[in-house]
Image: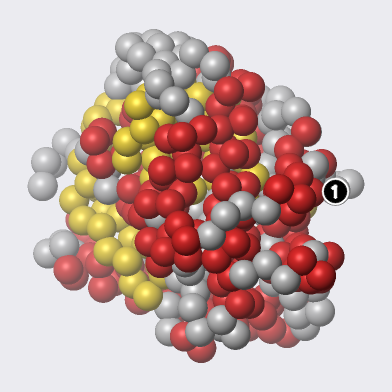
Amino acid sequence: LDMAARVVVGLMSGTSADAIDVVIASFTGAPEPGQQLGFRVLHHEAVPFEESTRAAIFALFSPSAPITHVCRMNFVLGQAFGHAINTAIRSAGLTPADIACIGSHGQTVCHLPNDSPPSTLQLGDISVIAAITGIETIGDFRPADIAAGGQGAPLVPFVDYALFRAATNRVVLNIGGIANITILDANGPMEAVRAFDTGPGNMMMDAAISKLTGGQAKCDLDGQLARTGAPHAAVLGRLLAHPYLARAPPKSTGREEFGANFVEELFAEFASLQLTPADWLATLTHFTSQTIADAIRAHAPATHEVYVCGGGQRNPALMAALQTALPGVVIDTLETLGVTPEAKEALAFAVLADCTHRRRPGNVPSATGARYPAILGKIAYAPC
């Protein structure tokens, strides 16, 4: 280990709730004027959730989930996160003494940025993580931005700016459950960064395949079904009329607008069409690619390169649809820039934890709508 470097663990459990991504990274410098944040990913590990835990997470998304279940899962997830971190530290050949701090995003169960007052809730108690690992743990990053008048999302643009800005007009696209973009103007200042959720990523496709297979399949593997179907114009037209898409950035969305309940309503509304599973998947895949492309064309028309991360980059049908929708734009995965796409979001929370640990702000007000740069998160100290 470089003794001058800060070694930080980043942890992410996304809206798909399939695994806990743990990244261990080392940092030098800082993402501040006149400085560059140097980084190296030392280790990345995806620790799958036990099926019972995953089912319990999805039960949290129901409006009727009892408060006792929410309370219990806050600690169940804290334990799962803590054990996943210990596993990753051992796998990397490191010890807790090597780690400066942990950044845990937590499991989002509710995100209501447009309510009055706006609110958000991520579970996975950081005191539990700190107790299990013996390491200072920083979590609950979003409320500080909301308290500053922001949407609490997206937070990753700060990281995209810190790590990936260059001499060309770039977009960093994350296709997780929700899709979001960060627009990086060539050599632009942080104040010029724009970022927002474009709409659904894999969320609607995953909900549809689960419904169509009676829960047997979690995703349309390699886009196999979508590639054999055809998008249905009437359904696509209905989807493209969704009010979220017309909303001006900064904006963020989630399962509340594009989750399984919305897919259920869609299936019921168009039941008389008797669409094949392949046509449903083709329609939803096309919807995701078109909403992403429309957002880039509207807000970053001079884009040269799009770098993709998140689970969606493993779907050839989605990637092909995206390239068709954006002719003349180079579309590649984040691997080209030195980051395994699956590791990106966990790396982001390592960067944000490093900022909080050093009492530095970690949001981009132009992306979230916050009134000022805020130091994000809460800190649970290591046991004495």
Q: Quadrant of residue 155?
A: top right
Which residue is at 49% across, 78% downward?
217
Q: Residues within 10 Å of mark 1 (few under 14, many from 20)?
A: few
Pick out the residue farthest to the right: 116
**What residue sits right under mark 1 in the picture?**
115
Residue 355 location in percent, x, y? 43, 37
Is residue 378 among the parts visible in the rendering? no
Query: At label 1, which amino acid type do we have?
Result: Asp
Relative depth, front residue between 82 and 15: 15
Which residue is at 61% across, 35% downward?
196
Which residue is at 30% across, 55% downward?
23
Relative depth, front residue between 266 and 155: 266
Q: Quadrant of residue 75?
A: bottom right
- The correct choice, above or below, for 27 with respect to 100 in the image is above
Relative depth, front residue between 219 and 368: 219
Residue 171 location in percent, x, y? 45, 27
Pick out the residue farthest to the bottom: 52
- The correct choice, above or below, for 6 with respect to 165 in the image is below
State how many labels appear: 1
In the rendered view, does 360 fall on the left or right side of 378?
A: left
In the rendered view, does 179 fall on the left or right side of 21?
A: right
Quadrant into which the C terminus falls:
bottom left
Residue 369 location in percent, x, y? 70, 29
Question: Which element is circle 1 on?
Answer: loop
In the rendered view, does 47 fall on the left or right side of 250?
A: left
Is residue 91 among the parts visible in the rendering? yes
Which residue is at 40% across, 30% downward?
306
Residue 245 location in percent, x, y? 73, 38
